[in-house]
Amino acid sequence: MVVSHATCEAIWMRKILVGLFGQQMDPTVIYCNNQSCIKSSENRVFHDRSKHINIRYHHLRDCVLRLIMLIEYILTEKRDAHILTKELSRCKFEFHRDRITVADNPFLVEEC
């Protein structure tokens, strides 16, 4: 459901950028740590187990097949959003902080 919502937001942003600059864009990459979501978006076969999925979520599959979106797997430990949503150890916090290129504020650092 979240990847489907992210797809809708990405399509909206792509339409704005194409309207502003008039260029065709490469496929937008969405990173996901749910392998079953990735497999179901790439598989054209409709299974009995997936019949409960609402029709609006099949839009994601259509975007992947038309190469508008690419969904790639990312390890849970590598998700930089954890810095905003999870309680992390200092080491993991600094790892994610450095990956999103946030610098220390020298005026807020406490000296020991």
Image: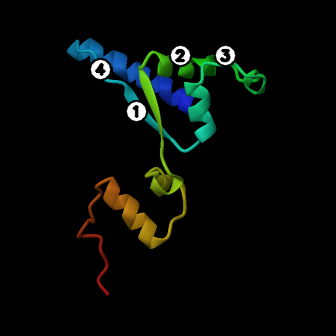
Above-or-below relation of 1 to 35: above
Q: How is the image coloured?
A: rainbow
Q: Tell me where residue 57 sits by quadrant.
A: top right
Residue 61: x %, y % from top left: 56, 21
User: As shown in the figure, which amino acid type bears the numbered disc 1?
Assistant: Val
**SS label for mark 4:** loop
- Point 54% across, 45% down: residue: 33
Residue at 30% from the left image edge and 57% from the top image edge: 102
Q: Return the residue at label 1.
A: 29
Q: Secondary structure at mark 1?
A: strand
Q: Residues within 10 Å of mark 3 (few under 14, many from 20)?
A: few
x and y percent of residue 27 in the render? Answer: 36, 24
Reply above or below: 14 against 95: above
Which dot marks residue 25?
A: 4
Res 1 seen here: no
Task: Give the camera-side residue of 112 and 35.
Answer: 35
Residue at point 29%, 74% (across, down): 109
Judged by depth in the image, the label closer to the viewer, 2 or 3, is: 2
Can you tell which quarter of the image residue 5 is in?
top right
Q: Earlier in the sequence, mark 3 or mark 1?
A: 1
Give amino acid for label 4.
Met
User: What residue is disc 2 on?
Assistant: 62
The reply to whether callout 1 and callout 4 are in contact (CB within 8 Å) is no
Q: Residues within 10 Å of mark 2 (few under 14, many from 20)?
A: some
Earlier in the chain: of badge 1 and badge 2, it is 1
The amino acid sitting under disc 3 is Ile
For the question of whether residue 44 can be seen, the reply is yes
Q: Is residue 21 left or right of residue 87?
A: left
